[in-house]
Amino acid sequence: MSEQGILSNEIKKLIKKNLNELRLIEENLISAAYDKKIKTIYVTSCSSKEGKTTAAVSLSYALADHSKVLLVDGNFRVPVLHKIFSLNKTPGLLDIFRDNEGHTLIPMSTEFEKLKVLPNGEPLAKTFNIFRNKTFIEIYNLWLDLFDYVVFDGDSILDSIDISDVVRYFDGIILVVECERTTCSALQDAKAKVERGGGNILGVVLNKRRYYIPKIFRRFL
């Protein structure tokens, strides 16, 4: 594995294909936020394999054009960021809770100067809401001081039992929908679950077609 995160040619081609749309993402985030600064973003989807990880990577790349960005693998079911960036799985997010060295955990560099990545780490024997852990909250607040944006590649909403306890800790939620696969019913269920947890849906990314934020799904949101 590389000591520096490197994207595959396939992902790079996808980013270049959507470059014009990606350049508008930060502007859309700012306009969607009105008078509130959007700094922490949770990228999720209704179900797995709808392209949320690719969307999280693309979003982070766009923001890192002129901002310091930390991309965190918060997908505890199927973490894949380390594979996408050809990095070791550890040290990573979950290693914070395995020992007392969490405060020295350093995100990994990538081929993009302003983009850092933190893999998921080795699985724990018991899962729990990391945002209820004092040590993690301290590290999370440190990240907010060091980076302009913190982007989580999160769990899928309908596949996670505790998503409602997580989304409230982020300034905004971006929901990834796969064109011609995600049903209106699933989208509405996912929206309801996020709102029950106090999450703020910034908009929807329509995958495998192009990026839309957020008017295309206004009737559902």
Image (cartoon, grey):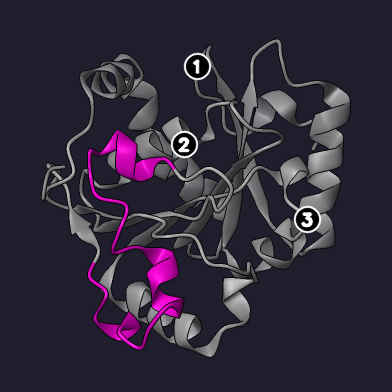
Three-letter amino acid code of the residue under disc 2: Thr
> How far separated are the C-alphas under marks 3 and 1?
30 Å
Task: Nearest to the eye among marks 2 and 3: give it.
Answer: 3
Q: Name the N-terminal-most of marks 1 and 2.
A: 2
Which residue corresponds to the image point at 55% horizontal and 64% vertical from the top-left?
35
Compared across the picture, whether 151 is left or right of 11 comes to right
Rendered image quadrant of residue 125: bottom right
Magenta residues, as a range?
Answer: 80-106
Q: Nearer the viewer, residue 216 or 154?
A: 154
Compared across the picture, whether 162 is left or right of 206 comes to right
Say which quadrant the N terminus sits in: top left
Residue 103 image position (x, y, % from top left): 30, 84
Q: Could you tell me which secondary element the residue under label 2 belongs to?
A: helix
- Report the residue marked by disc 2: 53
Q: Name the N-terminal-most of marks 2 and 3.
A: 2
User: Height in image: 51 above or below 42?
Assistant: above
Which residue corresponds to the image point at 73% horizontal and 67% vertical from the top-left?
165
The disc placed on residue 210 is 1
User: Height in image: 75 above or below 86?
Assistant: below
Q: Residues within 10 Å of mark 3 (few under 14, many from 20)?
A: few
Rendered image quadrant of residue 106: bottom left
Q: Could you tell me which secondary element the residue under label 1 belongs to?
A: loop
Q: Residues within 10 Å of mark 1 (few under 14, many from 20)?
A: few
- Report the residue marked by disc 3: 161
Which residue corresponds to the image point at 78% horizontal and 63% vertical from the top-left?
197
Residue 39 image position (x, y, % from top left): 44, 63
Q: Nearer the viewer, residue 187 or 33?
A: 187
User: Height in image: 16 above or below 85?
Assistant: above
